[in-house]
Image (spheres, rainbow, N blue to C red):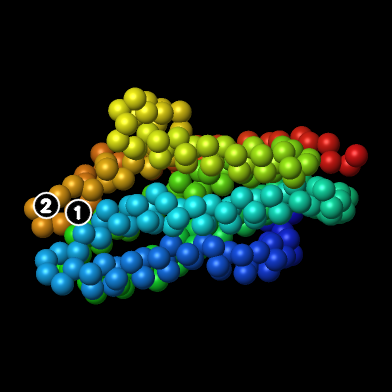
Amino acid sequence: MESMVNKAILKQHFKSNFVLWLILILMPALFVNLIVPLTINATPEGTAQISIILKLAVFTSIGFQVPLIYTIIASNKIMVGEVQTGRITYVIASPLKRTTIINTKIIFMVASLTIGCILNIILTAPIIAMNASKIDISMGGYLTQLIGMFLLLFMTCGITFLASTYFNKAVWSYVVGAGIPILFYILSMLANSSVPALENLKYITLNSLFNETNLLESNGEKFVLASADKWIGQYLAMFVIGTGLFATSAFVFKNKDLLL
C-alpha cells in the first residue's frame, strides 16, 4: 500500500524553506529573550510589567507578524509556485497519487509550525522561569499565550494554503492568501482600540478567537492562567477551523485540473 506521505518531497520542502523558517518562525523567541531582561533592568524596584509588553510586542504584534510572513511565503512557494513553474505537472505525472502529494505538503506546513512552537517554548521558557519572581506573568500564562499565538498562525496558514491551492496564479494567491490575514489583523487591532464604535469589528475577524484577556487573571501578585472554560473554546475553534481549511485544500487539489 502506498504511503500517505512522500519522504522525498517532504525533505525537499524542508531543505528549500529551512533558512526562511529559521529566521522568521523563531523570531518570537528572540523578541522574548530581549524584552524580558530589558524590562527587568528598566524596573529596578518592584515587579516588571512584562505581561502587557509581551502582549503588545509579541503575541499581537511583530512577534506574530514575522512568522505570518513565513506561512504566506512558504504556502505559496510549495503550491502555486510549483503550478506556475510547471513542476507540479511532473510530480502529478509520476506514480504518486494526488492524495500523497497534498498530504505531504500539508504535513510539511503543519510540522514546520509545530516544531517552531516547540522550539519557541524551549528557547523562552528558561528566561521566564529564571525571572519568575521579577515579572508579573506566570509560566502557565505565558506558555498558553504562546501556544495560542501558534494556533492562530495554524488557522491563518490554512487560509493562505487554501488560496495557494485554489489559484493558478501567484498574484491572486497572494492577494487572497495574504490579503485576508492582513485584513483580519487590521480589523482586530481596530476592534481592540479605545474607540467604542469599532469594538464590533471583532465579530468579522477570526483573529478575535485569540483573546488574551480571557487567558489571564490576577492573583494579586501576578497574572496567572485563568480557568480553562474561559479560553479552551477559542483554542478548539482555531484548531477546528485550521484543520477544516487544510482539509478543504486537499479536496480542491485532488479535484483540480493541473495538466493544462
Residue 238 spot, x, y in % from top left: 44, 40
What residue is at 34 percent from the left and 41 percent from the top? Answer: 211
Q: CA distance from mark 2 to mark 1?
A: 7 Å
- Characterize the local packing of mark 1: few (<14), some (14-19) or many (20 or more) Cα atoms within 10 angstroms: some
Residue 82 spot, x, y in % from top left: 79, 52
- Characterize the local packing of mark 2: few (<14), some (14-19) or many (20 or more) Cα atoms within 10 angstroms: few
What residue is at 84 percent from the left and 52 percent from the top? Answer: 85
Q: Which mark is residue 137?
A: none
Left or right of 42, for residue 54: right
Residue placed under numbered mark 1 in the picture: 224
Residue 176 found in image quarter: top right
The image shows residue 172, relative to residue 45, as above or below, that is above
Residue 18 spot, x, y in % from top left: 63, 68
Residue 16 spot, x, y in % from top left: 70, 66
Residue 55 visible to an observer of this rendering: yes
Q: Which mark is residue 219?
A: 2
Left or right of 5, for residue 245: left
Q: Nearer the viewer, residue 123 or 101?
A: 123
What residue is at 21 percent from the left and 59 percent from the top? Answer: 49
Residue 250 visible to an observer of this rendering: no
